[in-house]
Image: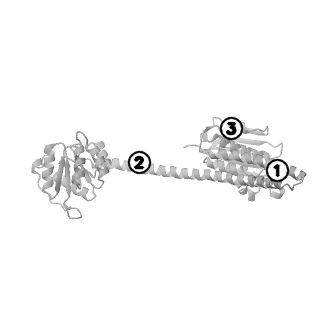
Amino acid sequence: MPSDAPPPGDWVPVDFDFMTARDDGRSLRVLVVDDNDGFRESLLALLATDDLDVVGEARSGRESLELVAKLDPDIVLMDVRMPSMDGIEATKRLKRIRPSVGVVALTAQDDQDVVRDMLVAGASGYVLKDADAAHILNAVRQAAHGGAVISPGVAPTVIDELTEALERERQRSNELEEAHDALVERIARRHDLVARLGHELRTPVTVIYGVARTLADGKATPEQQTELLRRLVGRSAALVRLVERFETAVDAELTEPVELGVIAKEVANSPRITIGAQPALPAVPLNPILARRVLEELLDNAIRFSAEDDPVEVWIGVVGSAVRVKVMDRGPGIAPRDRDRIFEPLEQGEAVDARVHSGAGVGLSLARAAARAMDGDIVLETSGPGGSTFVWEIPLAT
């Protein structure tokens, strides 16, 4: 108590505007918990002068839990420093079993860590033991009606700490929300990749089924049978390649640091392909098998749509916050009206009735879906009579 305050046994009533009763008219029931007999008795005397119903007293946190279960108080005045079980642990347990009970912490110390721990544990207020009687009674009433009181000696620092903690939680919440949105987007991209592969699987399966039924009818001539068997073998081979693509797509989530320059050299199986790269390229987190498939599809597309002697160039480098892989061919180019269509399933830049290049038209579609499944993308950067440049962009980890 401050030096000019009455001694503990002589606290005097103080007139308050706050209610001393619950909403149902019953007096507020208070349990006093303190291991100091003298201070506990002074609190009992103070509370008795203000029409509060003191239902019990306890000397430890453990004893307070037993009495709360028996006496059903509205407010617990809880000492912080006690043997056996301190006020912080007792408050945590009390709030778990009786969340509606208000807890006002009482202590002789203004330790900021203790203040924070008590408030986190569930205390509605924090009052220093040397506070005047009015302040203690005010804290009891405020806690009973959903309010909170913190002694002026500790309030500014506590408020600053809580404000900083709330700001950290807000930032963490925003980061979690952004991470969740990114995860949802990645799942959607992987779903798109698998869906495209499933769509492509149906095409050769349908052809194989039709050819097999025709052969089973036994009505085809020997020449027709030979042609049907040739088509059956071709479609089966295409189906095997699509299944391999499907298998790599399923593992798109399995990533590791990948050196794209090394993979590009491994998949460049034609003397027509030249590879250039910036020195000291960083490894990027990718699925190595899926990354290989993307490069294979881009290079296969460039080779098939270029003249036999035309070179195909690959350039790999860092541009801004991403690694870019450029695949440049010397083909006839892609008409502006077809530049979006070439990324759709079963599409090629050539019209069906004028097609001279083999393939089902799924390479670029699958390459883009695979790139997007790994958080990147493939775009047609330029195209004209002198050739086309496709760019695979992979964001660097931030």
Which residue corresponds to the image point at 59% horizontal and 53% vertical from the top-left?
188
Q: Nearer the viewer, mark 1 or mark 2?
A: 1
Q: Considering depth in this image, is 264 or 155 the residue closer to the camera?
A: 264
Q: Please give the residue where the numbered disc 1 appears in the rendered image.
A: 231
Residue that extends furthest to the left in the rendered view of this protein? 10
Which residue corresponds to the image point at 83% horizontal and 53% vertical from the top-left?
215
Count of numbered tags: 3
Q: Residues within 10 Å of mark 3 (few under 14, many from 20)?
A: some
Element at badge 1? Answer: helix
Say left or right for 214 vs 129: right
Which residue corresponds to the image point at 68% horizontal and 51% vertical from the top-left?
197
Q: Considering depth in this image, is 145 or 175 the residue closer to the camera?
A: 145
Q: Please give the residue where the numbered disc 2 appears in the rendered image.
A: 168
Q: How far apart in space, not on screen, are marks 1 and 2 (Cα)?
A: 64 Å
Going by the numbered disc 2, the residue's amino acid type is Arg
Query: What color scheme is it?
Result: one colour
Q: Which mark sits nearer the N-terminus, 3 or 2?
A: 2
Where is residue 62 shown, x and y percent of the image? 24, 44
Q: Considering depth in this image, is 75 or 325 the residue closer to the camera?
A: 75
Q: Which quarter of the rendering shows the C terminus?
A: top right
Where is residue 81 shown, x and y percent of the image? 23, 41
